[in-house]
Amino acid sequence: MTKPAPTLPLQRVAVGDCLDLMANWPEGSVDLIFADPPYNIGYKYDQYEDSQDDNAYIAWTEKWVRACARLLKPTGSFYLLIGDEYAAETRLMFKALERERKLVFRNWIIWHYTFGQNCKIKFNRSHAHLFYAVGPGAFGKINVQDPPFVFNRLDVAVPSARQTTYNDQRANPTGKLPDDTWYLRPQSAEGDYFRPGEDTWYHSRLCGTFKERQGWHPCQLPESLLERIIKLSSNPGQVVFDPFTGSGTTLAVAGRLGRQWVGTEMSEEYAAKAQERVLHAQETGTAKTTTYAQKGITRGQPKKKAEPRRSPKLSPVE
Ligand SMILES: C[S@@+](CC[C@H](N)C(=O)[O-])C[C@H]1O[C@@H](n2cnc3c(N)ncnc32)[C@H](O)[C@@H]1O
C-alpha cells in the first residue's frame, strides 16, 4: 500500500520536537515562517533546557533553520528573531543557505524595545535581531513592481518626513517603508496595535502587568511585532508557521488576520494554552487579554512574582 502524502496539520499547535514534526511535512508548503527560538541564555521553560553547550546549540540551530528553509515555498518569507549571543553565527547560516540558493537574505532588522531588564553596571539591553529572508523563487527576479514574494507595502508604509515635516510636493503620497530599526513605544496606550498611518509602534517588550501578557509563558512577544510581519509578508488565507509557538503570539495574530496557521511546541502545557489563545483570536478577531487578578498580581506588591521565573544564575541583570 502506498503511504498517504504528508500534509500540514493546519489550525493546530502540534506537540513535539519541531525537527521531528517538520521532517514529516511537505517541502515547499508554507508561505510565512516566524521563528523565535530559545536563546540559550538560561530561561526557565516548562520542558526545554535553555543552557546548552555552545557548539550543540549552534548545530541544533542550523538543523532547524535548514528544516524551515525546506518547508518554505519558493515565494515564501522567513523571519528569525535572535539575541546578541548567537546572532553572528545565525547570520552565517543564512549566508550558507543563500550560497546554496535555498534562501535570499533581505534585511537584518533591529527590533529596539524598551522595558528591557535594568542592569546595574552595564548598559541595559534594548534590542533583538530579526533576520528576514525570502524563498529561492526570488533569485535573479527581484522586481520592484512585481516582487516574487508577498510584500504588502501599503499595509506597513509610514508617513515620510517629506510629508510630515517639509510639505514637499515630491513626497510619495502613500508614505515610505519603515527603516530597518523597529521601535515599539512603551508609553503609549495598551491595546492599540500598529496603525499603518503612523510611524510609531505601540508596544514595548511585554511586561508582566500588561493586559496582553498571558502570564504563563516566560517570553511572550508583543502582537504588534508580529502584526507588521504578517501583514507585510502574507495574504489572507496563506499559511503561517511558527516552530517555537510558546504562548502562541504568531499564530494568534495570524488567526485574527485571517491567515491559516500551524505551530509546533515541545511543551504540551504551552501548546494547549496557546491553541486556546489562537482560537480565541481567530473567532473574535481580537487579542486575548488578562487581568491582574487572573495573573495573580496585586497592585503595590511588585516583588511578588506571579509569572514563571527566569534563571537567576544566567540572568542578564548584572
Ligand atoms: C522563545 S519561546 C517562544 C515565545 C513565543 N514567540 C511567544 O511569543 O510566546 C521558545 C519556545 O520554544 C519551545 N521549544 C524549545 N525547543 C523546542 C523544540 N525543539 N521544538 C518545539 N518547541 C520547542 C519552548 O518550549 C518555548 O515555549
Image (tube, rainbow, N blue to C red):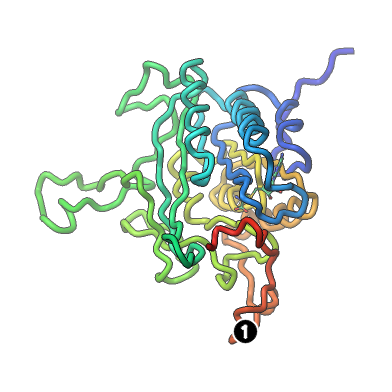
In the figure, residue 9 lies in which quadrant?
top right
| Circle 1: residue type | Gln
In the figure, residue 306 lies in which quadrant?
bottom right
Picture residue at 37% right of the left edge, 16% below the top: 140
**Residue that sits furthest to the front in the current view:** 121
Residue nearest the observer in this picture, 157 or 35: 35
Check the image and report above or below for 126 versus 208: above
The x, y position of residue 237, in whole percent, is 57, 39
The x, y position of residue 10, in whole percent, is 70, 38
Is 209 positioned to the left or the right of 174 in the image?
A: right
Residue 29 seen in the figure: no
The x, y position of residue 171, in whole percent, is 15, 46
In terms of secondary structure, where does tag 1 sit? loop
The x, y position of residue 233, in whole percent, is 46, 38
**Residue that sits furthest to the right in the current view:** 1
Residue nearest the observer in this picture, 235 or 23: 23
Is 206 positioned to the left or the right of 113 in the image?
A: right
**Badge 1, how many Cα within 10 Å: few under 14, some, many 20+?**
few
Is 190 positioned to the left or the right of 169 in the image?
A: right
Residue nearest the observer in this picture, 99 or 226: 99
In the figure, residue 68 lies in which quadrant?
top right
Picture residue at 42% right of the left edge, 60% below the top: 123
Picture residue at 55% right of the left edge, 70% below the top: 210
Check the image and report above or below for 174 versus 316: above
Picture residue at 44% right of the left edge, 33% below the top: 150
Residue 260 seen in the figure: yes
Residue hosting label 1: 301
Is 176 positioned to the left or the right of 95 in the image?
A: left
Work out which quarter of the rendered image holds the N terminus and state it.
top right
